[in-house]
Image (tube, rainbow, N blue to C red):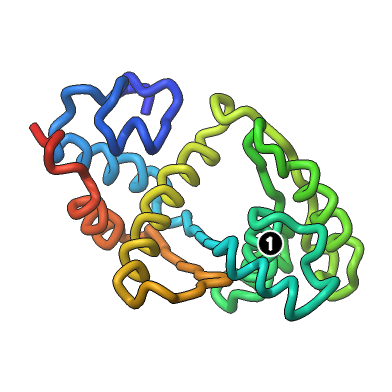
């Protein structure tokens, strides 16, 4: 990213073609995307979880005590954590090496997430795989910036997928698992996601 003059990546700036991406064409954006994710050499995967607020409220009413003290983002983190340690393609590696989490500073729910992590880490069911959790500034971590990249567009894809299925749909949890060993799917998504009015 440094070679492109991108000190800190923000997906919203990238999507809107704002500085430091001002004047970039769609072709340049796609080239940048492929270059950034190819550096991972197929070793990057992402889980995007969306929690619908009204659905969560109804879930709390249906199951008192289950989510009483959890925010939507806390529920989403719990779902991500559980999915990571139970997904068949990566569970063996996690059981061998464990898993650590990085949270971006500035989120009001970070303390809740940290408390939840440490509570779960003590449970026998996770077999000691939950190693650590840290809060770190986005500017200091390319991994967080890449997560922002992936989640921003996954969220848009989920929104577009469900928005036309009926006005009264309730989505307590919607998730998407995407592996970027091959970036063609991700790039195809970006092709439809870039604002046409800003295209050069």
Q: Nearer the viewer, residue 191 or 85?
A: 191
Q: Is residue 69 above or below residue 137?
A: below
| Relative to 61, residue 111 above or below | above
| Residue at x-position 64% and y-position 67% | 56
> Residue 17: x, y in percent?
25, 30
Image quarter hosting the N terminus: top left
Quarter of image, res 103 = top right
Q: Horizontal placement of 6 versus 32: left or right?
A: right
Looking at the rendered image, the quarter that the C terminus falls into is: top left
Q: Is residue 170 left or right of residue 185?
A: right
Residue that appears at 50% across and 74% down: 170
Instruction: Return the residue at label 1.
Output: 75
Residue at left offset 78%, top offset 79%? 63
Dot 1 crowding, Cα within 10 Å, few <14, some 14–19, many 20+ = many
Left/right of residue 48 with respect to residue 70 in the rendered view:
left
Residue 186 is situated, as x and y percent measured from the top left of the image, at 30, 57
Q: Position of residue 130 (x, y in %)?
A: 78, 58
Q: Residue at x 42, y 21 (%)?
A: 7
């Amino acid at each position: 990213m440094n070679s492109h003059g991108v000190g800190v990546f923000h997906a919203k700036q990238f999507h809107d073609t704002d500085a430091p991406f001002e004047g970039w064409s769609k072709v340049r954006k796609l080239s940048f995307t492929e270059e950034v994710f190819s550096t991972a050499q197929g070793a990057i995967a992402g889980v995007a979880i969306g929690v619908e607020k009204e659905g969560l409220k109804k879930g709390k009413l249906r199951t008192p005590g289950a989510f009483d003290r959890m925010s939507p983002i806390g529920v989403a983190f719990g779902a991500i954590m559980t999915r990571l340690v139970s997904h068949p393609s990566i569970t063996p590696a996690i059981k061998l090496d464990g898993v650590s989490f990085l949270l971006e500073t500035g989120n009001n729910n970070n303390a809740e997430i940290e408390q939840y992590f440490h509570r779960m880490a003590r449970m026998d069911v996770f077999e000691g795989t939950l190693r650590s959790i840290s809060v770190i500034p986005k500017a200091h971590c390319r991994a967080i910036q890449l997560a922002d990249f992936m989640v921003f567009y996954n969220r848009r894809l989920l929104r577009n997928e469900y928005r036309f299925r009926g006005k009264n749909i309730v989505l307590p949890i919607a998730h998407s698992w995407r592996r970027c060993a091959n970036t063609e799917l991700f790039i195809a998504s970006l092709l439809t996601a870039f604002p046409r009015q800003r295209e050069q």
